[in-house]
Image (cartoon, rainbow, N blue to C red):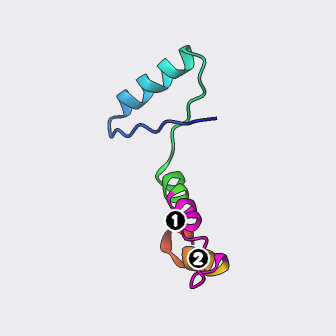
Amino acid sequence: MENILIHTENRDEINLLKEIAKKMGFKAEILSISDKEDIGLAKAIEENKGIESLSFSEAISYYKSLDKAK
């Protein structure tokens, strides 16, 4: 499965794009800021997977220390 992300600050445009996707038979989901941050964190972890200086548990510990995760 492939995905497309479209960024806009306008709620009306978001709703229009979601409705068009629905009419075309596609699944559409509006991501929250938290969802986008989680995706960014997962991507950073994956990109640094081979780096020995940062373990997965260290990354999770750091992430949990952020105000957003509390």
Circle 1: is it few (<14), some (14-19), or many (20+) Cα within 10 Å?
A: few
Q: Quadrant of residue 70?
A: bottom right
* Residue 63 falls inside the magenta stretch: no
Callouts 1 and 2 close, C-beta under 8 Å: yes
Q: Is residue 53 magenta?
A: yes
- Quadrant (top left, top right, bottom left, bottom right) of the N terminus: top right
How far from the left and from the top, in percent, is residue 9?
33, 40
Residue drawn at (54%, 52%), measured in percent from left and top?
35
Residue drawn at 37 percent across, 34 percent down:
11
Which corner quadrant of the image does residue 48 belong to? bottom right
The three-letter code of the residue at mark 2 reads Ala
Near mark 2 (Cα within 10 A), the count class, few <14, some 14-19 or many ≥20, is some
Residue closer to the observer: 45 or 38: 45
Q: Is residue 35 left or right of residue 17?
A: right
Residue occupied by mark 2: 59
Label of residue 44 in the image: 1
Q: Is residue 18 above or below residue 61?
A: above
The CA distance from mark 1 to mark 2 is: 10 Å
Q: Which residues are magenta?
A: 40-56
The residue nearer to you, when weighing 30 against 57, is: 57
Q: Earlier in the sequence, mark 1 or mark 2?
A: 1
